[in-house]
Structure formats: structure tokens, C-alpha cells
Amino acid sequence: MAPFPIDLISTFGKFSAYLIFLLIGFLFGYVLEMAGFAKSDKLAAQFYFKDLTVLKVMFTAIVVAMAGIFLSSAVGLLDYNLVWVNPTYLWPGIVGGLIMGVGFILGGFCPGTSLTAVATGKIDGIFFVLGVIFGIFTFGESVSLFEGFFNSSYYGRLTLMDWLNLPTGVVVLIVMLMALFMFWGGEQLERIFGGRSLTKEPKLRYAGAGVLVLLAIAVLVIGQPTIEERWEILSVERGPLLEDARAYQIHPGELLGLVHNDDIKLFMFDLRSESDFNLFHIQDAENATLLDLETRVGTLRLEPSNTVFVVMSNNEELSTAAWKLLVTERLHNVYILEGGINYWLDVFDSAGTHQAQLVLRPGEDMVHFFNAALGASHPAAAPDPDLLEDLEFEPKVKLELKLGPTGGGCG
């Protein structure tokens, strides 16, 4: 599924890849210039409701990309979880937007269009870019003074679907209709404040609006693939590694090594019932359900590349289901505790106290039962790392690279 992991430099060679980058940049700048986006008076005119070309162009790009992304996801051509979505910092974002908006009004440019103005030799564009550079320097030197606010109101990978708790297709249709209403409203403002004659506007824009609405309706009707459907696609590659090669089931000794590895950020999710978790659990493990993981995966996806996630249950049945969920949601570096908590106790409970009573739970999972709820106070909850010297196992954890931000901003 797309996005395809294509590295242009390794595929076409450094020289050819740089030519492609240059061509893309040239065409983008050329389109901005031809649209008049290198002229500060045209850009600033939107704030006076005289020329709303910028609003119409930007919203057209947004809704076309939105329809293309979610329609491609609906038919299985694109995995939306591989698309980078900027994390939300609500109040810093609002303040930053206000600052940029004031700068846009006063200077007549946004950062991208100012570079286009510089490329065409416009003096106001040159001074605007110099101001941008000075602002970046000033921000870098002063951010420590307000770092708390800068990192506040963090919501992770928050989308409209998450916020409104609505299906993707419904949100796509709502946003599409909202954008078309704004296009209509923008034209009315241009007519009232800019004296623009709407009779001269191309009639083809109505056909374009109709096509966009049909695309949004298609997204709504088809719907987005379920986790099970996405796993079916992914299982062609990952299934044999999981079931035959057992490449993702790590030995308790390897997990103990990860616990004491300062270069690794480790999350341990214990999928067992709360009662089993209270009887015994590995120190620093979190008790979680599949629903908890599904809810948190957007935030977990933003963790640094040196993060490793290990899921565990009494044996492997429930943890394997959790592994499939997280991997399907495109979380990297996810592993299963081999043999579950029972095997961990077999390896590290030298006194054999967990064998005091053996109870079969419903289903295939079997738990070694304790006479009291010991939680993480049992010696086996935090084994001595020196025990690793006597253990033999095949290390399996290999940190995978993950997608990061590729850029952003306007024009």
C-alpha cells in the first residue's frame, strides 16, 4: 500500500534525484508566480475582501487532497496511517496563527510566497524574507523563556474525525460542503467589496464543484477499511514473520535487557485482566486493553524512533492480537513477550513460588496463580540484570525507521 517507500536518490541516483527536486520546486514556484502569489498587494487584498484568490486556492488544494487521500484509502491504495499529520498544540498553534496572520496582513506575504517574490527580484519580498530569518533567529534564542507554553495543550495526532467522533466519510462531506460554501461566500464578498463581476467567472467551476461533491459522497459510501481488512493486506508480508519465523516474539531475557538499556525508550503493555495484573506484573508495565491501545495509538506513533513497544499476556494469544492491532496502525518496533508472563516467571522466578497454585482461565490463556496479590513487589517483577549472563537467546529487536514530518506551511 502507498505511500511507497521510494528513495529517489537510491532509485535514480543522486544527480537525477536532484534534478527531480529542482524541477518540482521550479514548477511549484512557477505556478505561484503565474497565479499572482508573488505580488504582496494581491495577497493582502484578501484581508480586505477584495480578492480572495488565496483563500480559494488554498481551500481547493485542501479539499482536493482530502478527497484524494481518503478515497485512495477507501479503495486500499493508500494507508492513511503512513501519512504524516502534524501533532496538535492547541493554544501555541492559535497564538502562532495570529502572529503569522498579522505578519501576512502587514507584509503581504506568507513564508512560501515571499520566496517566490525574492526569485522574481521584488524588493518587498527580499525584506520580508530577511524579516523571516531574523524572526527564526529571535525565536530560537528566546524559546526557552516560554517553553512551557510552547509545549502546552498537546493533543497528539488529532484529526477532525477524532474531535467530532464521526466517520471519516461524514467529515469529508461536511468539510467539502463547507469549502464550497466559503467559495460562494468569497465570490459574494469580492462582488460587494471588490466590485468583481461574477458573470465573467468561468462556468467550469460549477463542474469542478460537482466532481468534488461526488468524490466526497464516494468516500462516504465506500467507507474506510477496518483494522481486519488492513491486516489482511499487511499479513502477506508480516504474517510469515510472525507465525513461522517468530521474528517478533522476544525472549524474557531480551526484554530484561531492554528494561536496563538507557538508549531505548520502552513501553510495556500488559493485556491481562486487572485481577491477573494485580496478582503479578513486570515492574513499570502498564495494564491496558485493546481498546486502550487503539485509542492511544495516535499519540504513541509520535514517540521517537528509539522507542520499543512490548505487549504481553499470560501466554501469547491476547498479546498477538494487540501486536496485530498496533502494527496495522503502523506503529513501529512492536514486539511480543515470548511465552507471556508465564514464561517470564519460568525464567526469572528461581524460587518457583508462582507454581504454588495453577489455575486454568477461560480460553487458551493460562495464568500461574499466586496466593496473594503481589503486583510488582514479587522479586521476579524486577530481576537482577546480572542474570542475563546465564541466559542464551536470539536477539530479535531491530529498530525500524519511521516516517516523520516532510515539511509544511503555506504556498
Image (tube, grey):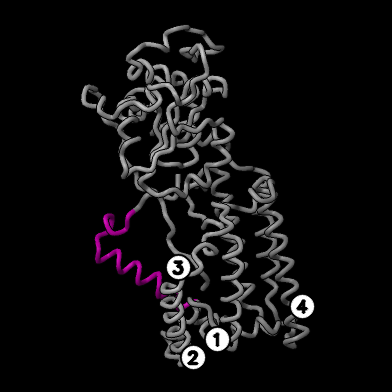
- Find numbered disc 2 in the image and state the secondary structure of the residue it sits on: helix
* Labelled pair 1, 2 in contact (Cβ < 8 Å): yes
Give whichever of discs 4 and 3 has the lower sequence position: 3
> What predominant SS class does the magenta segment belong to?
helix
The label nearer to you, 3 versus 1, is 3
Instruction: Please identify the quarter of the rendering in which residue 115 is found.
Output: bottom left
Give the residue pinned by disc 3: 144
Q: Amino acid at mark 3?
A: Ser
Q: Nearer the viewer, residue 109 or 265?
A: 265
- Say which element carries label 4: helix
Corner quadrant of residue 27: bottom left
Q: Residue at x 54, y 13 (%)?
A: 363
Range covered by the magenta-colored residues: 7-31
- Mark 4–mark 2 Cα distance, whole angstroms, equals 30 Å
| Kind of element beneath mark 3 | helix
Residue carrying label 1: 107
